[in-house]
Amino acid sequence: MADYDSGEITDREQKASENQTAISRQNVRDVQNQLSRQLANYDFADAQNRALADAQLKQNSRKTSADRFEAQRDLQNSALGLLGSMGTAMNGSTVGNLMRMLESRNDKENNTYWAQHQVNQDQVENAYQDSLNQNRVARRDVMQSAEKSIRDIGGDWRANMNNINPNLFPDETGPVDNDEELSSDKAWDESKAAQNMARISGYVQPDNPYAMAPQYQSATRNRVGGNDYFSQIMNRFNRR
């Protein structure tokens, strides 16, 4: 018969402690598995949000391209209407004035549409960054909650060991069954939820970064063939 006053551990108590340890170990693994799934869900959400943002950026580019085309066509129609009423005035300096007017108007519209396009692109990126920030914070919350849950399980395990028999109470305040793989420290991983600092995005760039390189430039714009007086005027103004 066991000596209860001396705290002798019986076979029954030893078995109960082993069962309790097995239960506590499984509880910790369940928390770790839940944490892994939650973090994976946030990774999944980030990937979906990035794909959506990329699609929206392309949609913005298509709309800007279509709007810019319409503006170019309107400018072309205006120029044609003006040219039809100029008659012989095209044989003088009026040609240069018209070309500078069209050039100035085209530059202004380019700036207007590029600026609006940049605003639209920034709005998409800002929305994505906001969702990314929220998911980073959410990751930290679930890791913190998992860390606390694992510590609670460890505390309950030690209390149950004490209730079975005080001599079974662990001397250390480490993880369940002193297994480091079950440590609450495993729940926190700073690399999985690093701080995401907002940055100003770069300017919108052409698709071809070498588009302005000499080898990619076409012949002089509006180059008119022939050697008549009007062609000479046009080509001379184009070389300015």
Image: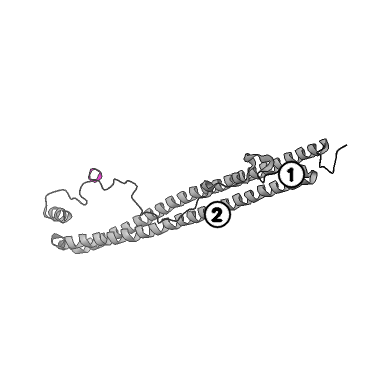
Task: Tell me if residue 198 comes above or below residue 210 in the rendering.
Answer: below
Marks 2/1: CA–CA distance? 37 Å
Is 235 displayed left or right of 180 in the figure?
Answer: left
Q: Is residue 217 magenta?
A: yes
The dot on residue 137 is: 2
Is 189 displayed left or right of 172 in the figure?
Answer: left
Residue nearest the observer in this picture, 220 or 184: 184
Task: Tell me if residue 1 comes above or below residue 73 in the rendering.
Answer: above
Segment colored magenta: 214-220
Q: Quadrant of residue 122?
A: bottom left
Q: For mark 2, does the 10 Å Cα neighbourhood hold few (<14), some (14 to 19), or many (20 or more) residues?
A: some
Quarter of the figure that contains the C terminus: bottom left
Query: Where residue 154 sits: x, y (%)?
Result: 69, 46
Query: Where residue 216 sits: x, y (%)?
Result: 25, 44
Q: Is residue 126 magenta?
A: no
**Residue sitting at 14 percent across and 48 percent down?**
226
Which element carries disc 1, helix, strand or loop? loop
Which residue sits furthest top? 11
The dot on residue 11 is: none
Which element carries disc 2, helix, strand or loop? helix
Residue nearest the observer in this picture, 123 or 20: 20
The residue indicated by pointer 1 is 169
Quarter of the figure that contains the N terminus: top right
Is 135 displayed left or right of 66 in the figure?
Answer: right
